[in-house]
Image: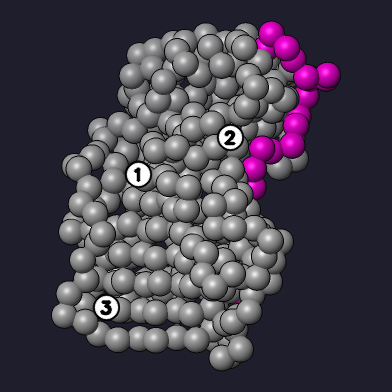
Amino acid sequence: MTVGEAFPFAIDRSLRRWSRAFLIHPEACVALLDDDTLTVLFGRWAVTTATSNIAAVEVGGPYRWWKVAGPARMSAADRGLTLATTARGGVCLRFHEPVRAFDPFGLFRHPGLTVTVDDPARFASAVEAVMASPADQPGDARALTPGQGTYRASTRGVIAWFRRGDDSVRQVKRAVAHVEPPARLDPSDVIQRFEDGVGPAYHRRYETRIVTDHDADSAMALLQTDFNLLANQRLGPITKLAGRFGTMEVGDRYVVSLAGPWSGPVEVIEVTPRRFRLATLEGHLEAGLIDFSTEDRDGDVIFSIESHATSGGVLSWLLYDVIGLARVLQAEMWVEACEIFAHVADGRRVAPVAVTTEWAR
């Protein structure tokens, strides 16, 4: 493989409720593979190993649903580990040296791993390709990407938002008669559409002005190469769930992994030189669209994040509209993203982040 790739897990509606009962969202499960490292993210758990540690790969299945539904499963016979979101089939990997997964002390290690990725044949072929040119030594390896934000960072984020003054954020809030998203989405098994959400509709825009040697096109190219550059790594790292590393294309998927029930899987539905648009997937806190864009204005670069969304469900509505905790945390996260963008573009902000909020009951 010349570039790494993210392989999403299969989404099986008949088993989704079992997965979610154990706080596993199939939409956010992924196998990340490059020339040196394999990392599998499954709920709060992760398995990471060097590709040189992979001894064999085989496509298998179907499986009996009661043997794979729900949490990770360890075989009593050989301690092999199964991370499954469907019974239709998957890929079995065998290792030279057993790997650790759940046990932080390394007392239990697993000689094999079965994963139910969405395209087993393609994943198996990609693994075979990296096995043909293995890394130097077998054994554990560093994860390809951060996994999850921390509760401490979330707490600090909420506190930071209430401490912000006019020198960092300028807010405008207003009620409107109607909020209309900029595009209609075709029906999909996993996309949460704006009109299917719960509670008030929100339109939010976060905008910052940057002095930089980059123009709007080159600044946006940086983000489309690595969306995770925009994230506070302790608050909400961004993991690619589907697609090649180093690029952004329609159909790619990501997840913003905050601690707690806030993690947000999204799918890329539009990409241009100065913008990309994301649609929320099932399991996201919100239902709707979010745009990231740049423009040249009077010699500076304007970076904006603009969303049109409703709450994704009753729990989301309680956290967002009634309690308000999710709303505050989201606002701090995107304001921080605007501040981080200035560093990504090797520039500096020349004005506070402008936050405009419109809502319609």
Name of the residue lying farthest toward the bottom: 166
> Nearer the N terminus, badge 1 or badge 3?
1
Residue 310 position, x and y percent, is: 27, 65
Q: Is residue 58 left or right of residue 183?
A: right
Question: What is the secondary structure assignment of the residue under circle 3?
Answer: strand
Question: What is the secondary structure assignment of the residue under circle 2?
Answer: loop
Q: Which residue is drawn at 50% across and 60% down?
A: 294
Q: Quadrant of residue 165?
A: bottom right
Q: Do the residues labelled 2 and 3 touch (CB within 8 Å)?
A: no
Question: Which residue is under mark 2?
Answer: 245
Query: How far apart are the two marked residues, 1 and 2, measured between alpha carbons?
Result: 17 Å
Question: Which residue is under mark 3?
Answer: 359
Which one is in front, 288 or 303? Answer: 303
Q: In which quarter of the image is residue 239?
A: top right
Q: Would residue 277 be seen by someone viewing this image from the given angle?
A: yes
In the displayed structure, 104 sits above or below 336; it is above
Q: Residue at x 39, y 36 (%)?
A: 251
Q: Would residue 99 be seen by someone viewing this image from the given angle?
A: no
Question: Which residue is under mark 1?
Answer: 269
Q: Are marks 1 and 3 in contact (CB under 8 Å)?
A: no
Name of the residue lying farthest toward the right: 136
Q: Is residue 274 magenta?
A: no
Question: What is the secondary structure assignment of the residue under circle 1?
Answer: strand
Residue 74 position, x and y percent, is: 54, 26
Q: Give the magenta range.
A: 131-156
The kind of residue tagged 2 is Phe
Q: Does the magenta stretch include residue 146?
A: yes
> Nearer the N terminus, badge 2 or badge 3?
2
The kind of residue tagged 3 is Trp
